[in-house]
Structure formats: structure tokens, C-alpha cells
């Protein structure tokens, strides 16, 4: 699959990050897969929490670092929050992630770059970097893989949300 254009979103605050998460959450359908990568402290979990809230998840969303997968059923779609940081490729493969990826919910995978061969071809990849002189800003780089995700990014760019 040929990668399409990438897009950028500059966040100067948590409020900006929440806005991006809400704009993406409004577009999800069953089987949506969003991957998050970035250094420790870049904001993957903060984005995940904002995304879950925008999806209508009522529960407290915390990092699934030690549980690997947390399932939330209280939103408009089931939300599967995954953190594969502590897994080998073999361990991740044994979890049966494809059942989540191709199921009725939305999968958000932190540290997805550690399991590239297990990810579906169609997904939205997001890489988060610290930015700004004070380190409080974030630069989100969105890479759509597949037509639905490409259309999301094109629409967000047309609306002035993405660069």
C-alpha cells in the first residue's frame, strides 16, 4: 500500500489536543484503528483520554501500560485502549489483536511502531512530538493509511484544522 500525504496539527495546550481528539472521535465507525506513537511524555495518554471522552466513555481512562488492553463499553461505540510498549511481537500476536481491530469498536494503540506487522493496513497513524520553547506544545503528525482515513484528513485540512 502506498502511503498518502501526511498532515500536521499544532497543539499549544491540552485544550487544543482535546479539540483534535474530538474532531477525530466524531468520525469513527466500527473497526476504526488509530495508532499513537511518540516519546515518553509526548501526550499519548492525554490524547487517548480526550478521545475516549469525546466518544462518550463515562469511565476514567488511564494508561493500559500494565494491563495491555482496557475495554470501555459506555461510549457510542466500544473503545479498546491498548498499550503494547511492554510486549514483544510474539506476545502481541498471541493476544489476538485482530479481533479488536476488525470488531465492532474503535481501537487506539499506543506504541504501535513496536508491532508493525500486526497492524491493519487501513488505519490512522499519529506521531506526537513535543514542541515549543517551553515544551508544553505538541506537534501531531497524522498519516492516513486507506481511503476513509485519507478522507478524514482531507476534510480536516479543508476545515482549517490540519496543515
Image: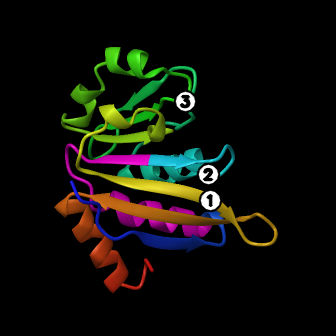
Q: Is residue 150 left or right of residue 142?
A: left
Q: Is residue 140 visible?
A: yes
Q: Is residue 128 left or right of residue 101?
A: right
Element under label 3?
loop
Q: Does residue 58 lie above or below 16 as drawn?
A: above
The Cα–Cα distance between marks 2 and 3, rounded to whole angstroms, is 15 Å
Q: Magenta part of the protein: which range?
A: 15-35
Q: How far across and how far down the image is residue 39, in percent?
A: 64, 47
Q: How far across and how far down the image is residue 92, in percent?
A: 39, 21
The Cα–Cα distance between marks 1 and 3, rounded to whole angstroms, is 17 Å
**Residue sitting at 19 percent across and 45 percent down?**
30
Q: How far across and how far down the image is residue 60, in percent?
A: 53, 37
**Residue sitting at 81 percent across and 68 percent down?**
134
**Residue sitting at 42 percent across and 39 percent down?**
109
In this view, the residue in front, 17 or 87, is 87
Name the residue beneath numbered marker 3: 85
Name the residue beneath numbered marker 2: 43
Amino acid at each position: 500500500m502506498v502511503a498518502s500525504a501526511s498532515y500536521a496539527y499544532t497543539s499549544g495546550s491540552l485544550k487544543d489536543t482535546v479539540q483534535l481528539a474530538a474532531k477525530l472521535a466524531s468520525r469513527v465507525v466500527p473497526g476504526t484503528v488509530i495508532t499513537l506513537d511518540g516519546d515518553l511524555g509526548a501526550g499519548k495518554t492525554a490524547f487517548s483520554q480526550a478521545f475516549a471522552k469525546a466518544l462518550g466513555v463515562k469511565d476514567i481512562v488511564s494508561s493500559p501500560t500494565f494491563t495491555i488492553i482496557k475495554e470501555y463499553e459506555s461510549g457510542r461505540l466500544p473503545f479498546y485502549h491498548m498499550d503494547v510498549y511492554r510486549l514483544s511481537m510474539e506476545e502481541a500476536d498471541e493476544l489476538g489483536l485482530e479481533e479488536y481491530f476488525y470488531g465492532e469498536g474503535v481501537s487506539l494503540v499506543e506504541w504501535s511502531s513496536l508491532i508493525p506487522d500486526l497492524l491493519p493496513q487501513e488505519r490512522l497513524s499519529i506521531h506526537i512530538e513535543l514542541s515549543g520553547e517551553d515544551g508544553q506544545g505538541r506537534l501531531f503528525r497524522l498519516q492516513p493509511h486507506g481511503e476513509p482515513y485519507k478522507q478524514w484528513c482531507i476534510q480536516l485540512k479543508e476545515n482549517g484544522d490540519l496543515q
